[in-house]
Image (cartoon, rainbow, N blue to C red):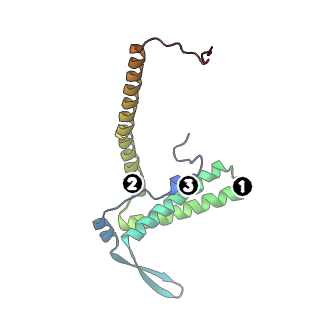
Amino acid sequence: MDENRLPELPQESFRPMIAQSVQLEQFLGEELIFCFRNLDGVHTFTTCYGDIYKTVNALRDYVRLLESVCDQWELTGFHRATYEYHAEKLRKIADKLQAGIGYDYDKAVERCKKKRAKKSHSSDVGEDALLLTVQAANKSADNKKEAAPYEEDTPWEPELE
């Protein structure tokens, strides 16, 4: 299976999973001035690094979503071309924004995958402890059965005379 292709779109996959420190949040909240020229003149607005960062992540995630549903929904012709066109345009917008703030979405995803792989190796300590406890309990129950006098294991009740 292709790692970039989503087989399904479960809700859990789209819940936020990032926690940032207060200091980082303050840095990300510093205002930046955006300027662009339009037919009716120059426009400016203020935003912050954190907003651009979140916008880049949202755009690139949406690009991945558009590309994955083309195969998943078996889109062809005009519908597929429309999805691919929008995905390419959004990727270009995200690339411009990330270049402007010195961010690399692809590297961030790779770091996240490596970190997740590391955690999966050592994250089941609680499960291991629980498994050992259950095994020890089963072993002690078996030992008690062996030490107890012989009792016939039968589903029938003894007949009373």
Indicate which disc, 1 or 2, sits on the residue closer to the N terminus. Answer: 1
Q: Is residue 80 left or right of residue 14?
A: right
Q: Quadrant of residue 67?
A: bottom right
- Mark 3: secondary structure: helix
- Please tell me whether mark 1 or mark 2 is closer to you in this view: 2
How far apart, in angstroms, are the residues tagged by discs 1 and 3?
29 Å
Q: Amino acid at mark 2?
A: Ala
Is label 2 or label 3 in front? Answer: 3
Quarter of the image where one finds residue 63: bottom right
**The residue positioned farthest toward the left in the image shown:** 23
Q: CA distance from mark 2 to mark 3?
A: 22 Å
Residue plotted at (61% across, 57% down): 84
| Residue 88, percent from left and from top | 55, 60
Give, as a three-letter code, the residue at label 1: Gly
Rendered image: mark on residue 108: 2
Relative to residue 8, is residue 83 depicted above or below? below
Q: Position of residue 116 (x, y in %)?
A: 39, 45
Residue matched to label 3: 11
Where is residue 41 shown, x and y percent of the image?
49, 88
- Label annotation for residue 77: 1
Q: Is residue 67 above or below residue 26?
A: above
Query: Quick one: SS at disc 1?
Result: helix
Residue pictured at 53% horizontal, 64% vertical: 90
Q: Is residue 143 left or right of residue 60?
A: left
Of 119 and 114, nearer the camera is 119
Image side of residue 98 versus residue 80, left or right = left
Question: What's the residue at 61%, 16% (across, down)?
Answer: 160
- Quadrant of the image containing the N terminus: top right
Identity of the amino acid at label 3? Gln
* Nearest the eye: 42 or 70: 70
